[in-house]
Structure formats: C-alpha cells, structure tokens
C-alpha cells in the first residue's frame, strides 16, 4: 500500500490541559448481569430527540410486542454520534459515548465512570485501548484525542488533566483491531493504522507509515491507491 505523503501535517502528540475537574470513584468489582451480557442479540441505539442511550433485548421479542417492551437499559447521554460496548479488565463492562457528553458508563448500572469536557470539536467516534485509555475522533478540528484514563481510574485520581492530539483531517472513526493490535482511524481522505507504544503514563500512538491508505474519493472507500504486491497482513505483522 502506498503511504500517504503529508508533510504539512504534524503527527507528533501535543499535551494540552483538560479543564475537567470532576472526580472519579475507583471501580471495584463492577456489577455484571450475566443474563443481559450473555444475550446474543442486544441492540444499542441513540435517541437524538430524547438525548437517550437505549439498549433493546431482541431475544425477548414476541409477536405483538413494541420496541419499548424490549428496553433493558436507558440513560441520558446528551447528543451522541458514536457508541461502543467494551469489556475492560479494570472498569468491567462499559459503554463508550462520543458526543456532547463524551463519557464512559458502567453497564448495566448506567453509572458514569469517566467523562471529559474537552473531547474536541464535533466528536464522532470513541474507542477504548487494551490499557483502558481512550481515543476520540473529532471532525471539525481534525484530531484524534488520546486520554490516559486507565491510570486515573486505577489510582482514584481526578479525571484527566492532560491529553495528546494527533492530526487527522476530518477525523470520523476509530476502531481497535485485536487481531493485529492496531488502532484504525478514518479521516476525510485517509484510513490510517496506529500502533500503541509505551505503558502507563507514557503510552502513546505511533502511525504505521506503510499502512496509510489514501482515499481518492472520500465518498467511495473502494477507490484507493494500493500496490498489488503488498499485503496488509505482511505490513501489520512486521
């Protein structure tokens, strides 16, 4: 694959103060509802009008039931653009929300475990790394914002005072790939791969230079520049 040559952008992380001063309670023995977690057909949705995050148990559907009858989870989260369910070794089962109230919520209790007042301008997507740290993709300012949240929760400190920014024009999506242990990030004209380097307070993102896919047409992801002799698996396993 051809690397997108973009010398004008700065891919170095910049630490910036976060004005959030809300404290987080240490998560100990997070509650688990095995009946809910083990359900094979759970549907998570966001009600923009009601500013609600709702989860429906589709397995309990019976003819004649309304969607409201299938609700198992309902909390206020403001306007949201990105939702994900994750299982974390420290926080337990959580829901990640990117939007006006970018936060981590415990599932199924709905307790807010972490949030930030500075997710970036127009956050679209959120992802949790294996360490528990958070990455938010914000489109208007074109950044991936990296929050070191795991150490904060583990040591019961205040919510993040600093974060790191990585430039990506019109950043819209982030997704952790457990097979190759990389973070995929989608921008307006580019799909990038990032490796996670360092540990604890020194954890950071590092772009895989040979794994930048230039999108010729941002509305059609099938149109990309690539080398027929290069395989994604070969690059990511190096």
Image (cartoon, helix red, strand yellow):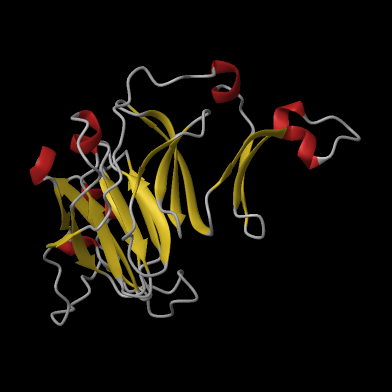
Most extreme residue toward the right, as rendered? Answer: 64
Q: Residue at x 19, y 36 (%)?
A: 157
Taking 110 as reference, is 21 left or right?
Answer: left
Compared with residue 238, is residue 65 higher up or lower down, i.e. above or below? above
Most extreme residue toward the bottom, as rendered? Answer: 8
In the rendered image, residue 207, in percent from the top left (x then y), is placed at 17, 59
In the rendered image, residue 117, in percent from the top left (x then y), is placed at 34, 57
* Closest to the observer, 114 or 37: 114
Q: Quadrant of the N terminus?
A: bottom left
* Closest to the observer, 130 or 180: 130
* Closest to the observer, 174 or 121: 121
Q: Residue at x 43, y 34 (%)?
A: 94
In the rendered image, residue 185, in percent from the top left (x then y), is placed at 32, 60
In the rendered image, residue 89, in percent from the top left (x then y), is placed at 31, 25
The quarter holding residue 181 reads: top left
Number of marks in the rendered image: 0
Taking 14 as reference, is 88 left or right?
Answer: right
Q: Residue at x 25, y 43 (%)?
A: 133
Q: Residue at x 43, y 80 (%)?
A: 217
Compared with residue 209, is residue 225 higher up or lower down, i.e. above or below? below
The quarter holding residue 168 reads: bottom left
């Amino acid at each position: 694959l051809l690397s997108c040559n973009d010398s004008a952008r700065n891919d170095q992380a910049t630490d910036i103060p976060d004005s959030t001063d809300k404290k987080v309670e240490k998560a100990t023995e997070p509650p688990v509802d095995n009946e809910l977690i083990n359900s094979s057909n759970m549907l998570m949705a966001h009600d923009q009008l009601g500013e609600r995050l709702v989860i429906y148990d589709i397995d309990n559907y019976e003819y004649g039931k309304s969607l409201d009858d299938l609700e198992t989870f309902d909390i206020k989260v403001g306007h949201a653009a990105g939702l994900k369910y994750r299982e974390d070794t420290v926080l337990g089962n959580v829901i990640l929300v990117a939007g006006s109230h970018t936060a981590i919520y415990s599932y199924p209790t709905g307790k807010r475990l972490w949030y930030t007042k500075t997710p970036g301008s127009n956050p679209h997507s959120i992802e949790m790394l294996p360490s528990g740290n958070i990455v938010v993709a914000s489109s208007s300012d074109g950044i991936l914002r990296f929050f070191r949240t795991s150490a904060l929760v583990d040591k019961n400190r205040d919510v993040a005072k600093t974060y790191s920014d990585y430039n990506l024009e019109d950043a819209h999506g982030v997704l952790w790939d457990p097979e190759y242990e990389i973070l995929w990030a989608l921008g307006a004209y580019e799909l990038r791969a990032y490796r996670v380097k360092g540990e604890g307070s020194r954890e950071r993102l590092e772009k895989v230079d040979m794994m930048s896919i230039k999108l010729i047409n941002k509305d059609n992801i099938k149109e990309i520049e690539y080398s027929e002799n290069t395989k994604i698996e070969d690059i990511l396993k190096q």
